[in-house]
Amino acid sequence: MNFAPNHDNHDGRWVLCKDSLPLCIGCVVEILEDLDSTPTKQKHTLTAFLCLCSSKPAEVYSVLTPEDPATIHFLSLLHGLIWSQDRRLASIAVEAIVNMCSHVKSQDLMMSLLNSLITKILLQTSDTSIRIAVVQSLCQILTHNEIYAETLLQADIAEFLYETLATMDHLLIGSVFCCLLLLSGCKDFYSKCHSVYGLEAIIRAIKHCIQANHVKEGAKGFQMLGEILAKQPEGIPIFTNANTPQQVFSLVSAGLRLHNKTLTISASIAMNSSLRVHHLGNKVDLEIIENTVQECLMEIKHQLSLSCKSRTQESLLRSMVLLLHQCFRLTLQWQESSLVKFNDKKSLEEFEIFLLQACDSSCIPSVVANYDNIKSEEVLANLFGMLSAANQMKIGGIQEFYEKLVSASFLQIALSVKSSCQNRPRLEHTVNGFVMSVCERLFAVDHQPDVQSLLMIMKTTFPTVKGDVQDMKEHLQEDNINGVTSEQIVYLTLLYLAACHGDRIIEESILFSIVETFLRNHADVASLPTYTVKFLLLLHAVCHQHVESSNATEGCALLVQGLNRLSDLSSVYTHHPAVLQWCFSTPVITPTVTRNLVRL
């Protein structure tokens, strides 16, 4: 570049990039100071400076240090150029300020810049391009240095950003949402009520984006809204107006009607975040909540049917599962509260029935259809957490719901997840909770006196087993001189429940070999716990349907001998077609046993 006339008077340390195209910082400052310099020359000079900042930032900022007065002077010159009538020069000056603030990491420098009200003044200018540049500059500063979020909040920048949202320009709105998202990571954003003050402005801006069909900016707005509602402390009310929740629900519905997958995901997440007890207060309109949740689920299903990318499918499933899980948690909290009042149009029991039906008709089919694309621990943890929560609902139909889950291979899925999550305690805990909920609910109608002892064994031992097929085989084929182990009882219980409802955890031929080995290792079948005999009878009968050699095996003979010695066969009988078929096709069974089993 051309040096300034006084270049020879500048300290040599100001000359950078000496081995190629040199640039003298002193000359850059001099050219910017010179009132006779043309805007063209100043633009050329600043562009050269920015190019060097991009290619060799370390070299530039080894000279421009925060403690050097020359750095502050340079920044003040750039501030002056922002008001240039040449808008291109003003834009380059803003870019240069951003670059310097991003690299010259100084809290004092940042405060001095903010306290000059230059940033606030620029946010209030009528020139939209300048306001966009300023907001994007703040975004870059926060992206490179998160520590400045607190500084910006102290300078009330959030309030100026909220005022900036009162624009029709979607690019400016999108930039402001990005900046607010970065600021929302700071605790002061909530403790100092910046979230409360800006909620109405955010809602209005999202509404404008939706009406103008600006889906990208609308999605960013919903993301911002969801972030605020999720992180807002319970002690600081966010919905200061009783009508605000309904405004949020209506906004979510409007966003869903644009049928855009990104907007659908972010709107559903915002809906999820709004469903908090401390947000909704003591007077709740369940009808509008149910309608909005239903709309979210329907649109997510629609987007799932259109999407072929696994990452997108997982994001859609995540929003569906998180939304329903939050609804389940919310109803359980309401169950324990006598303060919440619901309108006459929809009762809590009706809402819980809706959730169970929604889970059955929307969530479960979507998860099963797209299960191979789920890699996220969060999705799986919320899925099994939601399914466990259903067990605490005080409505009818829960047992049928769990029976349907088992028939849809959810025990098999749970064991598969458990075997792969040994180092992920949160996920393993939720899977364990789900399996226990299934056992408690499905054995609740079994009036055998030893059911409670069985459930206690399940509760204490299931968390300790691995859950994979190999571990199952090793335990069940183990010959223990002390009798049946708790691990064997756990695995027999799970295999029994799966067989009862048409799930196949293990292939029948392998299961038959396992049951045969177990029976040979425990030849005195009648001395086994009653529920163990019950499980073995059904499992052997199920295998019998698929394995031709199961009729006259040693294990089959030992099982029949054990049944002959039992005084009450009703305690080991399971009403299942396979048991009846086994009775009439097993040659070693006695007519008395067959007759007694058939009568049951």
Image (tube, grey):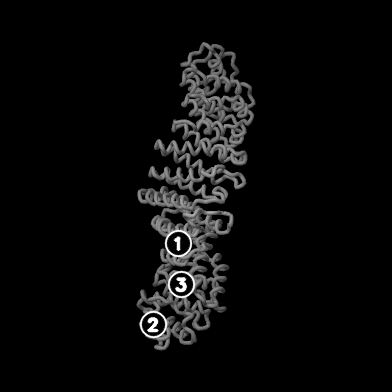
Q: CA distance from mark 3 to mark 1?
A: 16 Å
Q: Quadrant of the C terminus?
A: bottom left
Query: What SS does tag 3 mark?
Result: helix
Q: Tell me where residue 80 sits by quadrant.
A: top right
Q: Residues within 10 Å of mark 3 (few under 14, many from 20)?
A: many
Q: Which residue is mark 3?
A: 496
Q: Residue furthest front?
A: 344
Look at the image and tell me whether residue 420 can be seen: no
Q: Is 528 placed above or below 129 here?
A: below
The amino acid sitting under disc 1 is Ile
**Horizontal and vertical percent for residue 122?**
53, 25
**Res 583 label:** 2
Residue at 46%, 50% in the rendered image: 288
| Mark 1 lies on residue | 413
Q: Are marks 3 and 2 in contact (CB under 8 Å)?
A: no
Q: Which of the marked residues, 1 or 2, is nearer the chain's N terminus?
A: 1
